[in-house]
Amino acid sequence: MGIGTYEAYRERLSKMKPNVYLDGKCVDRNGDWIEGGCYVMKVCYDMANDPKFADVCTVKSHLTGEIINRCTHIHQSQDDLLKKQLMTRLICHRVGGCMQRCMGTDALNAIAVVSYDCDQATGTNYYERFNKYLRYCQENDLVCNCAQTDVKGSRNSKYKRAHQQPDPDMFVHIIKTDVDGIGVDGKPCKGVIVRGAKICNSNAPYVDEIIVNPTKFMGKGDEGYAVSFALPADWDGVKLMALPGLHHKRKHLEAPFSKIGDVESLTIFDDVFVPEDRLFLNGYDNPDVVQYAGYLALMFAHFHRHSYTGCKAAVSEIIAAQAALVADVNDIAKAEHVREKICDIIGTAELVFAAGQASAYRSVRFPNGSWVPDEILTNAGRRLAGHNIYHEYEILADLTGGVCASLPTEESFFAPETAELCNKYIMRNPEYTAEETHRVMRMMEDKLCDAFEGAQCVAGVHGGGSPLMETITLMSRYDLEELKKIAKYLAGFDGVECPRYERKTATPRAMLERFQKTQRQDGM
């Protein structure tokens, strides 16, 4: 099929076994708690089926030659990277926040690169397995997410390695191998048993497939923790502890922005059987592949940060749009300090998006045929977005004022006894009607005063890696020693020539090579 529909997606959800736990009770995939996230999926599917967006939301599969949803595509060119970024921004604009399918796209692209590299170095056959899985996702236009962040347990330095934790289950790991079981196709097969949990796992309760990646580099003793796999979201033993996020439910003033939501999940793998054909990394059975755990973790983060240059640019543009509108409604739009504040937001949005574009133009083709963007630029863009998100919300709160936190109830604007007075006294700029003013202030109430947007604000800092992680990445990739030669030359150091400094494209492969070198030095 290649391009699915929202109706087919919801039908798949309705047939899933209940394994979502809400307030301690196991529930099926229905009810108000899931509708905010499903609304986002509807927009994703609808835009892929709309000819107006076909140029960015659809693409020809390199596997089948069929037209598919770009959310299931492996980037085959610089243009693919640019189109993915454009698609992300466009969908984010229409839902008023994160498009949510980006995690699955980025996980698929990461495994495509790493599984091939691992096969070439170690003689495994993960890439073949992955392509079979990818074809399945493309043909059915499945919604995938990525479970990468382990709960990690104690952060004490003496528990630095995963296997050193007092409780070995703080990182997802293989506990048994060569196990007989039943595959996703219903046929007997071999596989492994995994145990552990992933946290900060967005959207898991309403995806088709959960893709599991390691969270960091693994070393000697961590063999069982070097594991990557994909399973249906309702697979036996997978337990999803859900935290729904929604805007206020509107009775009279329904609007696109009020429909968005998501569901976070503590995703628990309670002695889960993973069929062999769904394993994309298995250090338990082959210690040679352990080094690829961190490489895969970094590759996912890298692709995801490139997606963020579309997503977070869009979020800043949404905030700028809301700031401009509320300033107009409050009749303060022409004040110079207002223009300066909105300009701050616009500047961040443009620079973040530009970083993503530049990283695509500086991308390189990897041996499997995938195109991988420049790592320094993706991290620079994501870092800028994370540093500025609280400032952007601060500006929005400043321009809105306190009324969004103290409005009478929505019903008060429609009840016979109170409607006239409420509508009279909400008026500000006479160019906007009372209803328009009311709608804007309700949107600001959603944006600034509810729990869901509070979580989104934190996600703007930490999602895809906090600014600290981007700092670590940038400082580890940037050749400061070479750069310092310029300063030494300018300062007049004896015998120092000014180098012809032209930074090469950086990718996570550099960290794999550094890790391999460290392992050799340690005799591992």
Image (cartoon, rainbow, N blue to C red):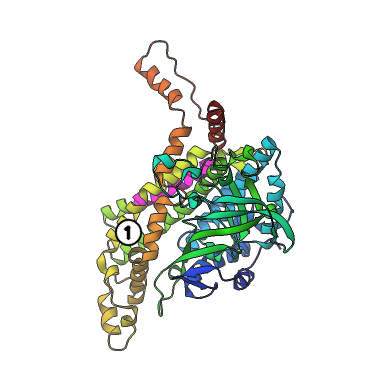
Residue 137 pos. (x, y %): 66, 58
Q: Is 389 located above or below residue 516 in the figure?
A: below
Q: Is residue 213 above or below residue 207?
A: above
Under tag 1, what secondary structure?
A: helix
State the residue lying farthest toward the bottom.
Answer: 416
Reading the image, the residue beneath label 1 is 396
| Quarter of the picture holding the N terminus | bottom right
Can I make out residue 321 in this image? no
Q: Identify the residue at image location x=45%, y=23%.
A: 482
Q: Amino acid at mark 1?
A: Leu
Disc 1: CA contacts within 10 A as few (<14), some (14-19) or many (>=20):
many
* Residue 242 x %, y %: 47, 65
| In the depicted structure, whether residue 214 falls above or below residue 251 | above
Q: Farthest residue in the top direction?
A: 495
Q: Is residue 251 left or right of residue 100?
A: left
Secondary structure mostly seen in the magenta stretch:
helix
Q: Which quadrant, please, contains the C terminus?
A: top right
Question: Where is residue 394 drawn, in percent x and y?
Answer: 30, 56
Q: Is residue 353 magenta?
A: yes
Viewer-nearest residue: 187 or 115: 187
Image: magenta residue range: 342-359
User: On the rendered structure, is 294 left or right of 119?
Assistant: left
Q: Is residue 248 above or below residue 267?
A: below
Q: Is residue 137 magenta?
A: no
